[in-house]
Image (spheres, rainbow, N blue to C red):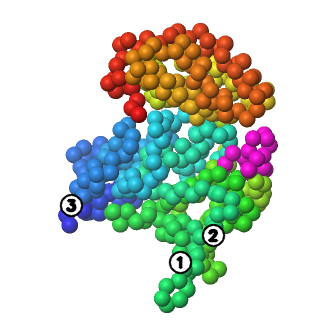
Amino acid sequence: MKNHFVKCQVCGQEVKDLITDHLQEAHGLTVADYLSQHPTAEVASARLIKLREANPTPDPQHPPGPENLIISMAEIPFRLYPDVPTSACLPMPDHYRVPLFGSLGEDVEHALTALAFRRSLYLWGLPGSGKDALIHAWSSLTRTPAILRQIRPGADIEGWFFSRAFNEKGTYWEEGDVLVALRDGYLSESGRNIPYLVLLTDFDRAEKEQAESIRLIADSIQGRVDGPGGRTYPVLPGSIVTATANTAGGGDERGRMVSANLLDGSLMDRWQRKFQFHWMDWLDEEPIVQAKFPLLFQVYQQGYLDKFKLVTKNIREAILDDRLMGEFSHRGLCSILGHATDILTLAIRKKDTPPQDLFKKAVRAWVDGIPDRDNRTNARAMIDPVIAILPTGDVSHIDQNNPLVPGF
């Protein structure tokens, strides 16, 4: 059992698994203060360190070692739960970077502040603005256990909390996983009950009855959860309920989110924090694009990025000014550049010269998704002149065994 405990060098007390809470409560010390006084001291048990090594954090910049029990996102500190496995958290989005610039950088800073103080949170905004991605990244990086539920019209949300079941003895009430998570938390390997994060996506698609099922758990005053037989239970302190949506609860105001419903004003008022998300600034978007599509950068260097910076700016301004009906989120940009990578890869595998109009061909992957001809024509008129002068790609130095060349 000794490998379950770590000894405090201040008072000699043996603490199970993690000494951080003991340091704060008994001595008013942070881990950094403690290690400055006792540089060779252990802050985590041998068992817990072994558990961390078996479940590494997905971001190598934030290893879950005992020296790093607090991580930072956008300079906002968060507690790390190293005894929670990654399988209990939301997965880290590929090539994720915390947005720092422009309007979205400010949006994210507000949302992270709310998460730091464990507030119920309603995030709404343009499709592809990173609402769900931020919550996924936060859960993954902080090792916060999480449950994801998508709101689908007609689905039985009440079953998330409780439902009727039966066996050979008759019928009985069965508690749902959301009820259990919010009431009891996640039982970690070290025996702690760690508060859950519950993420509700597409919340503005909720029908009236579905939305009412969420009313209590979003409450900014008491935080309760419905149970069977009319019972309610207090939510475990520290639990977070977060919703993401494309509208602010007032229905479709842009003519693009026609499946969004009106949400009761008193329900919306229960969310402690409500923030709008905007599209990503190019200062954040460019390094992500370069990381996602390294083959394009290998062949076309900075030139193609400069052109798509202008394309992205022009298209998004036209959409926001109602001169173009459509959406051009980060996903839309990735559709174009992903298709360009596919076309380029085929040329390399066939040992052909890439087509001179490679990017013009690739733009179809997004433009053809615009639902009417006039808007498709307008979009082409803004894009084609910008990308028409891109140079022909030289792939003579790249063979199909290059690790940057995607496989089939």
Q: Quadrant of the N terminus?
A: bottom left
Answer above or below: position of 186 versus 403: below
Which residue in the protein does label 1 denote? Answer: 174
Which residue in the protein does label 2 denote? Answer: 158
Indicate yes or no whether the magenta region holds residue 343.
no
C-alpha separation, residue under disc 1 versus residue under disc 3: 38 Å
C-alpha separation, residue under disc 2 versus residue under disc 3: 43 Å
C-alpha separation, residue under disc 1 versus residue under disc 2: 11 Å
* The furthest residue to the bottom: 169
Q: Position of residue 206 (x, y in %)?
A: 70, 58
| Disc 2 residue type (three-letter) | Glu
The picture quadrant where one finds residue 373 is top right
Residues at marks 1 and 3 touching, judged by CB atoms closer than 8 Å: no
**Marker disc for residue 354:** none
Which residue in the protein does label 3 denote? Answer: 3
Q: Quadrant of the C terminus?
A: top left
Q: Main secondary structure of the magenta part?
A: loop
Q: Position of residue 386 (x, y in %)?
A: 64, 14
Camera-nearest residue between 291 and 122: 291
- Residue drawn at x 51%, y 36% is 98
Do we see residue 203 in this rendering?
yes
- Residue drawn at x 25%, y 47% is 38
- Dot 2: element: helix
Q: Which residues are magenta?
A: 245-259
Query: Is residue 313 rendered to the left or right of residue 54?
Result: right
Answer above or below: position of 191 versus 163: above
- Residue drawn at x 54%, y 18% is 358
Camera-nearest residue between 168 and 99: 168
| Disc 1 residue type (three-letter) | Glu
